[in-house]
Amino acid sequence: MKTGRDANRSGLYVSECCLKEVVLSESQMCPRCPRCNALTVWEFVKQDGRTRVVGAEHVFPSDHASDQFIPEGIS
């Protein structure tokens, strides 16, 4: 999926450009690459229902399913 598209399922994704991993929730917008800030293609790696996105770089277990990363410059 490309930057700006919504993830079709929750889980771990990796950026095509820098191989940076992020966790996205279903219907969450795919961000720019957090390493190089480029538009990128995100590849689904695995499903994990116990994680959330924190700053699009760090993955931690959480009970806060409503926490979401919003890419800078997108409202």
Image (cartoon, rainbow, N blue to C red):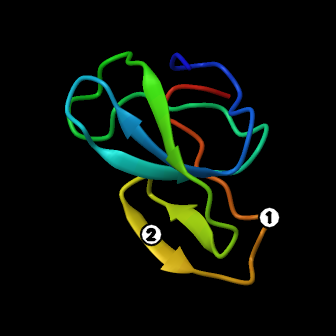
Q: Name the residue under label 1.
A: 66
Q: Position of residue 1 (x, y in %)?
A: 56, 20
Query: Can residue 69 be spotted in the picture?
Result: yes
Residue at (68, 33) in percent of width and height: 7
| Quadrant housing residue 30 | top right
Q: Is 35 above or below relative to 30?
A: below
Q: Position of residue 66 (x, y in %)?
A: 80, 64
Looking at the image, the residue that sits furthest to the front is 46
Identify the amino acid type marked 1: Ser
| For residue 31, side relative to residue 34 (left or right) | right
Q: Distance between the residues labelled 2 and 1?
A: 15 Å
For the residue labelled by badge 2, is the local secondary structure a helix, a strand or a loop? Answer: strand
Q: Which of 56 and 45 is in front in this view?
A: 45
Classify mark 1: helix, strand or loop. loop
Measuring 49% from the left and 78% from the top, which residue is drawn there? 60
Horizontal side of residue 63 vs 13, given as left or right = right
Image label count = 2
Q: Earlier in the sequence, mark 2 or mark 1?
A: 2
x and y percentages locating residue 53 in the rendered image = 54, 60
The mark found on residue 56 in the picture is none
Observer-nearest of 73 and 21: 21
Q: Quadrant of residue 49?
A: bottom right
Circle on res. 59 = 2
**Residue 72 visible in the picture:** no
Tell us which disc is closer to us: 2 or 1. Answer: 2
Classify 10 Å Cα crowding around label 2: few (below 14), some (14-19), many (20 and above): some
Dot 2 amino acid type: Val
